[in-house]
Amino acid sequence: MVRPSKSVKTMSKNLTKEEIAIRTQTEDKLKGAADEILPPTHLNARQKKIFNFIVKELQASGILGNLDIYILSTCAVAIDRVQQIERIINRDIERLLDRNLLSAKDKYSKEFFRCCNELSLSPQSRAKLGNINFQVRVEEDDQLLKVLRGGKK
């Protein structure tokens, strides 16, 4: 099975500077603007709150664009539905025997985990992003690397 492509910002693969620059430029063009990341009107109040929370938390990463509104709204709905199902079960533990309810929970949980992969929401994804950002910062601050690249101290 072929693995899905990843953003150059989240890759640990060794690429040349030229390859990184080209891919970054292409990804930035395709990402589009990030000036209107607002929850769609069809979301309810709880879903809008979840949507805004995710946007706020991911804002510093710079990975979101206006086109991500659709996956963000899907994620917000999935989280809200799983929470609703959990509230139903907590009120009446006998509902654990309800196949339809558990099937719906399974469906929305899978949807949530798919969204986590798409939006880099898992702890593993965030750790990878953090490590990549740290490595870039170390390389930028390394005086020897600056001199070797032809820059000044």
Image (spheres, rainbow, N blue to C red):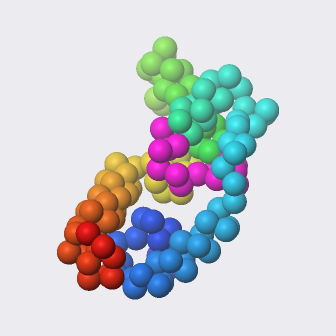
* Residue range corresponding to the magenta coloring: 57-71
Residue 15: where, in percent of width, then height? 39, 83
Asked whether residue 51 is in view, the answer is yes
Residue 124: where, in percent of width, then height? 33, 54
Q: Which quarter of the figure is the C terminus placed in?
A: bottom left
Residue closest to the far front: 152
Magenta stretch, main secondary structure class = helix
- Look at the picture and state if 1 lies above or below 121: below
- Answer with the quarter of the image where residue 80 lies: top right
Queried whether the magenta region covers residue 5, the answer comes back as no
- Look at the picture and state if 45 lies above or below 65: above
- Answer with the quarter of the image where residue 42 lies: top right
Residue 39: where, in percent of width, then height? 70, 36
Label tally: 0
- Is 77 situated left or right of 113 in this image? right
Residue at position x 47%, y 84% from top?
18
